Image: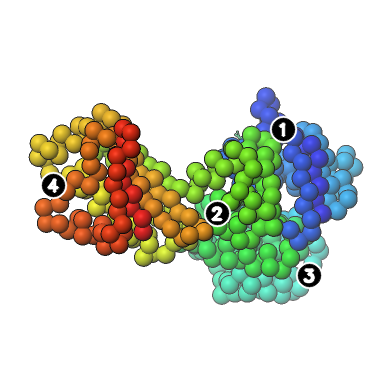
Amino acid sequence: MIRVEHLSKRFGDLEVLRDVNAHINRGEVISVIGPSGTGKSTFLRCLNLLDPPTGGRIFIEGQEITAPNANVSLLRQKMGMVFQDFNLFMHLNVLDNLTLAPVKLLHKTKALAEAKARELLQMVGLAAKEQAYPAELSGGQKQRVAIARCLAMNPDIILFDEPTSALDPTMVSEVLGVIRRLAGTGMTMVIVTHEMQFARDVSSRVFYMDQGVIYEEGPPAQIFDQPKKEATRTFINRIRNLEQLIEDYEHYDIYALTTEIIQFCEKHFLGPGQRDAIIHLVEETMQLCMGTDNSTETLRRREILRKTGGLSLFISYSEKTKQINARFTAHARLETILNRSQDTDGLGMMIINGITKGKAVEKIEGDRVILDLPL
Ligand code: ADP
Ligand code: MG
């Protein structure tokens, strides 16, 4: 359905897409993943000619859309696009947002366009909101309206550019749910996303983009579990795990750290129980490690941490075994991370042992002291 040959795109001296080649069949759902700034958005914008390519050719159903005489507006109608920040018409209510283009561009009657709009609003769960203005909707609702508006043009292909990135975590799943349902209807879709679990479930193939090329592509099981190339593996591991360095006691931000943990849990669809367990575990461990008083012992330990590069936290989650592990490491001069002299009432260790079911293990390897907290 879509064929891309040697696509390149530069902005002035900046070569953003170097040599992109791709083949997308009808009904396929392609997820595009990769570090930011590698040209994922530019790739989508070139596909529907929002950004004119600098070189190469793009074919849609055998027709070259990069040819000088191509019918660009017809192409745009076939290909819908959903943006990160919704792009709704703020001065129009939901129903008018959905009927404007079908009436103006497809020359539908108002009545027909409205009937179709209501059907689509039903499908995205927003039938009750047809008179609302975008400003009255939540982010998740706005994005569902944007998807319905895109569908109102009857596209053959939909391009999504990070459709959930601007949303509060609580609203991500309602939007992903709508996209999942669309995937089930056989719609051809290309989705740039950071939601890896979603990409894994919904895609027929995954494109890993890096430095202006599709660096590796394959079925989700290959890209996520057995990437063939080193850069893909590094990227997959980085997004799968959470890594934080707590440099010293005075300067760490427990709220920022908690937010990171919450996002990590959302990314992996971990429930509130597991989320709260991880947060408690991290808080208790940090208190035992860094102390809460100003005793000589506490100050001595904080000084060691400051001089030896701090305390690192690495949280990993295996989708296969469903095992979560929180690993703290520090310089071996600290001797122990779980400093029991801080735990006078024994409550800290009780909580840690409760959450890890007594499986906390601390050991010294080389010049590192390592604490593994499985849960
Ligand atoms: P991604 O979506 O993977 O994060 P983008 O496609 O948005 O990456 O951007 C790739 C690179 O192209 C970035 O360095 C960005 O600054 C640059 N870029 C994107 N659009 C433009 C533009 N209109 N003019 C100049 N540079 C741009
Ligand atoms: Mg982008």
Query: What residue does disc 1 label?
Result: 18
Mark 3 vs mark 2, CA separation in Å:
39 Å
Can residue 209 be seen by looking at this rendering? no
Look at the numbered discs 1 and 3 and tell me whether their residues touch, using CB distance below 8 Å.
no
Query: What residue does disc 3 label?
Result: 109
Describe the colour scheme in one phrase. Answer: rainbow
Mark 4: amino acid: Ser
Look at the numbered discs 3 and 2 and tell me whether their residues touch, using CB distance below 8 Å.
no
Q: Give the camera-side residue of 242 and 45.
A: 242
Q: Which of marks 4 and 2 is nearer the N terminus?
A: 2
Query: What residue does disc 4 label?
Result: 341
Q: Earlier in the sequence, mark 3 or mark 2?
A: 3
Q: Which of marks 1 and 4 is nearer the N terminus?
A: 1
Q: What element carries label 1?
A: strand
Residue at position x 71%, y 68% from top? 185
Q: Is mark 2 on a helix, strand or loop?
A: loop
Q: Quadrant of residue 359?
A: bottom left
Mark 3 or mark 2: which is in front? 2
Q: Quadrant of residue 366?
A: top left
Mark 1: amino acid: Arg
Where is residue 279 shown, x and y percent of the image? 32, 55
